[in-house]
Image (tube, coloured by chain):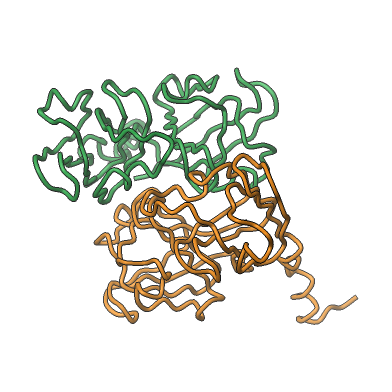
Chain colours: A orange, B green
Amino acid sequence: PIRTAQQQEAFSAPLPEVLSRRVTVFEQEHFQGKCMEFTSECCNIHDCGFDNIRSIRVESGAWVGYEHHHFEGQQFVLERGEYPNWESYTGNLSYHTEWFKSFRPIYCSHHSSRMMIYERENFMGRCTELCDDYPSLQAMGWFRPEVGSMHVQCGAFVCYEYPGYRGQQYIMECEKHSGDYQHWRNWGSHCQTPKIQSIRRIRH
Amino acid sequence: PIRTAQQQEAFSAPLPEVLSRRVTVFEQEHFQGKCMEFTSECCNIHDCGFDNIRSIRVESGAWVGYEHHHFEGQQFVLERGEYPNWESYTGNLSYHTEWFKSFRPIYCSHHSSRMMIYERENFMGRCTELCDDYPSLQAMGWFRPEVGSMHVQCGAFVCYEYPGYRGQQYIMECEKHSGDYQHWRNWGSHCQTPKIQSIRRIRH
């Protein structure tokens, strides 16, 4: 049978992402207490009867957790595996609030990820293309510990304040804001500096 | 001119690593106070006149910092970039001691890194080969959140307790212990469980 270009494209497309997203959240540490399974976003855990979330088991997909309701505040990338306590999913001492109030799947339907980083805000100054994982941007040739602006061309990345994937996290997706992050104030409601020293792709 | 195989090998070898290793350590946060530059290991910072190290600038190479003298206690991988305070180089809440007492370069003269991970101690049970970065071992097919033993065939890796390069860190080098880590008690003097959920190569 002869396939048209459109049929071939549909045939080779991955399964819809919604089929492969599942997370179980627990009110107590170490997967104890009240629990609930989710396959899509939750913009306020109080509406689901939870006071707080203290442990998480990601069964599939990549997710982002937020400090506050409605996807505000500090961000935490959550990939498949077990997070028995607050320390394990934040990996971060900058905030001492142990709150986890909303979460959603990360949009990364592309199989590859590609982004541009720029020296200055509004996509100006020196720039370079990223399509791999970079535990130290400076070791790969970027000339300073800051980034001025970013454009995600496809896929999704997580950017970190310090080398080695440490410190504040910022999730950057092609499918949000058209992939445009023209100033550090757009990177997240908790972002206070343009400091970025490591960046990696989000894959799942 | 005709080169022998041996000459060609010497010709294409990278520059000796010692030429490209440099770290500056500071007694105070934010690169303040007494400072000193190192190009090789320091087994006790007190012998160099420091009470503690609170900020670090890695100029080149990859390094590992230790909680205690003589390369004991919690490990912190340090790649090129700026670490202005304790939070930035630990990325870890498991220990609340703010000590940084010795450090050394990481041995990763190979340009590629390859290791085997095994289900059980002493290289037994199911196994798989790793030669990339894995923010979630379970997402890439490993069947549980623990590893029983490991053998580093070439290069160096850092293994983490939790997904997304968080939690306790264990530096694994081909050039230490012949690359053999047959039980979690060999992973580091601070290691208390076989929990490993993410692994990445150390490159510089």
Above or below — where is B186 with respect to B77?
A: above
Measured from the top left, where is residue A147 in percent x and y? 31, 67
- In the visual, does B91 lie left or right of B164? left
- Observer-nearest of B161 and B93: B93
Measured from the top left, where is residue A57 in percent x and y? 65, 48
- In the visual, does B195 lie left or right of B174? right
- Observer-nearest of B24 and A142: B24
Above or below — where is B171 with respect to A174?
A: above
Measured from the top left, where is residue A110 in percent x and y? 61, 68
- Observer-nearest of A44 and B138: A44
Answer with the quarter of the image where residue A190 lies: bottom left
From the image, which quarter does the C terminus of chain B lie in? Answer: top left
Measured from the top left, where is residue A9 in percent x and y? 74, 75
Answer with the quarter of the image where residue B89 lies: top left
* Residue in view at x 42 percent, y 61 percent: A159
* Residue in view at x 35 percent, y 41 percent: B90
Callout count: 0
- In the visual, does A172 lie left or right of B63? right
From the image, which quarter does the N terminus of chain B lie in? Answer: top left
